[in-house]
Image (tube, rainbow, N blue to C red):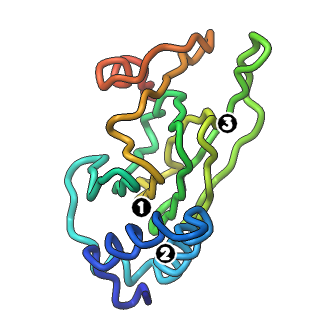
Amino acid sequence: MCAKNFNLEQFIADARKAAISENPINAAETLMQTTVADCKGVIANMPAIAECERMLFEDETVSIWYCRFEPNLIVPAHDHQMHVVVGVYQGIEEHSFFDNSNGEYKEVKSLNIGAAQVTKLSPNQIHTVTATKTASHALHIYLGKLSTVERSLFEFESGNEIPFSVENYEKLAQVN
């Protein structure tokens, strides 16, 4: 699929095929790289979405989300319990990754993912997300049914693990 001809329905169909392929992580990554390679094409053809996050599609094998992050809001530390492929098509997502092993909660690395860039996250990777300077816009492919998996959030200061829920997520989100 060429991003110049980006079509959300076709992207979803291609992501569904990637999710059931022999190597779904690599297939989803390749699809995402092809998709965000022409950011202008995605921007021009992506439907307008008012929400910061919207599930675009979900079944037992894949969940596809649109995500917009704002520079004044830090998403709480969380895991996904499944592989994720992130493709940014506008702005920059700023990820901070944490280790919560051995009773210690500490930041271990940070990564900025800019327009036309893709990254993969492993199931147990703990991270926060914000945007730098201006809002970021991205497509996220989760290799599983994200809405039904038991996930965790982590309190910013203590690293205490709590169950993922919308209420806990909103409570832990931080405004810069």
Image spot of residue 21 (x, y percent): 51, 70
Q: CA distance from mark 2 to mark 3?
A: 23 Å
Q: Give the secondary structure at mark 2.
A: helix
- Characterize the local packing of mark 1: few (<14), some (14-19) or many (20 or more) Cα atoms within 10 angstroms: many
Q: Classify residue 43 by image quadrant.
A: bottom left
The image's mark for residue 156 is none
**Which amino acid type is shown beneath numbered disc 1?**
Leu
Residue on which the image places disc 1: 139
Q: Is residue 47 left or right of residue 75?
A: left
Q: Give the secondary structure at mark 1.
A: strand
Callout 2 touching callout 1 (CB < 8 Å): yes
Q: Is residue 136 left or right of residue 125?
A: left
Q: CA distance from mark 3 to mark 1?
A: 19 Å
**Which amino acid type is shown beneath numbered disc 3?**
Phe
Residue at the (62%, 9%) spot, across then down: 158
Residue at the (46%, 43%) spot, across then down: 71
In this picture, is 55 found above or below 96? below
Q: Earlier in the sequence, mark 2 or mark 1?
A: 2
Residue on which the image places disc 3: 97
Image spot of residue 79 (x, y percent): 54, 33
Q: Is residue 158 left or right of residue 138?
A: right
- Characterize the local packing of mark 3: few (<14), some (14-19) or many (20 or more) Cα atoms within 10 angstroms: some
**Residue 94 versus residue 167: which sits nearer the camera?**
167
Q: Give the secondary structure at mark 3.
A: strand
**Residue 74 versus residue 127: which sits nearer the camera?**
127
Residue on which the image places disc 2: 36
Quadrant location, the N terminus:
bottom left
